[in-house]
């Protein structure tokens, strides 16, 4: 999964760019769920199955944008799986 943020800078014409690669398999690690809010922990038992299903879907269909946001000030945020 890739998270990218492109935002215009106030002091120049250039843009601030942030690119974060995040492994999809992190959601399947059981110790990660201890640090999430209580409301999210109910999904822990199905996390490994969900990661497996997402990987299979990606193999068959390729990558896709999970979230894509364009704001009025020119900031672009996208999460690509």
Image (cartoon, helix red, strand yellow):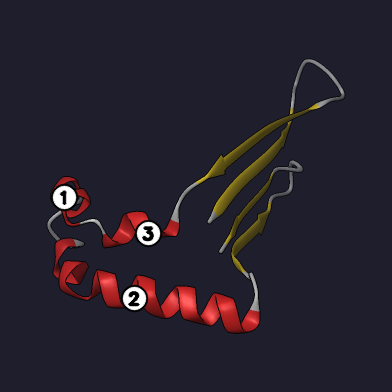
Q: Residue at x 18, y 54 (%)?
A: 33
Q: CA distance from mark 3 to mark 1?
A: 12 Å
Q: CA distance from mark 2 to mark 3?
A: 10 Å
Q: Earlier in the sequence, mark 1 or mark 2?
A: 1
Q: Which residue is mark 2?
A: 50
Badge 3 element: helix
Q: Quadrant of residue 81?
A: bottom right
Q: Earlier in the sequence, mark 2 or mark 3?
A: 3
Q: Earlier in the sequence, mark 3 or mark 1?
A: 3
Q: Residue at x 17, y 52 (%)?
A: 37
The extreme right residue here reads: 13
Residue 36 or residue 53, whichever sits in front: 53
Badge 1 element: helix
Q: Quadrant of residue 35?
A: top left
Residue 33 or residue 69, whichever sits in front: 33
Q: Residue at x 16, y 72 (%)?
A: 45
Q: Quadrant of residue 38?
A: bottom left
Q: Which residue is mark 1?
A: 31
Percent from the top left, x then y, of residue 1?
A: 53, 56
Percent from the top left, x then y, of residue 49?
A: 29, 77
Which dot, 2 or 3, sits closer to the camera? 3
Give the left or right position of residue 73, taking residue 21 as reference.
right
* Number of marks drawn: 3
Badge 2 element: helix
Dot 1 crowding, Cα within 10 Å, few <14, some 14–19, many 20+: few
Q: Residue at x 70, y 36 (%)?
A: 7
Q: CA distance from mark 1 to mark 2?
A: 16 Å
Q: Which residue is mark 3?
A: 25
Give the left or right position of residue 48, taking residue 18 as reference.
left
Dot 3 crowding, Cα within 10 Å, few <14, some 14–19, many 20+: some
């Amino acid at each position: 999964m890739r998270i990218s943020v492109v935002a215009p800078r106030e002091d120049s014409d250039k843009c601030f760019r942030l690119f974060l690669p995040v492994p999809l398999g992190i959601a399947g690690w059981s110790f990660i769920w201890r640090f999430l809010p209580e409301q999210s922990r109910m999904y822990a038992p199905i996390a490994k199955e969900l990661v497996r299903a997402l990987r299979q879907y990606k193999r068959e269909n390729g990558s896709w944008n999970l979230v894509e946001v364009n704001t009025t000030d020119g900031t672009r945020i996208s999460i690509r799986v």
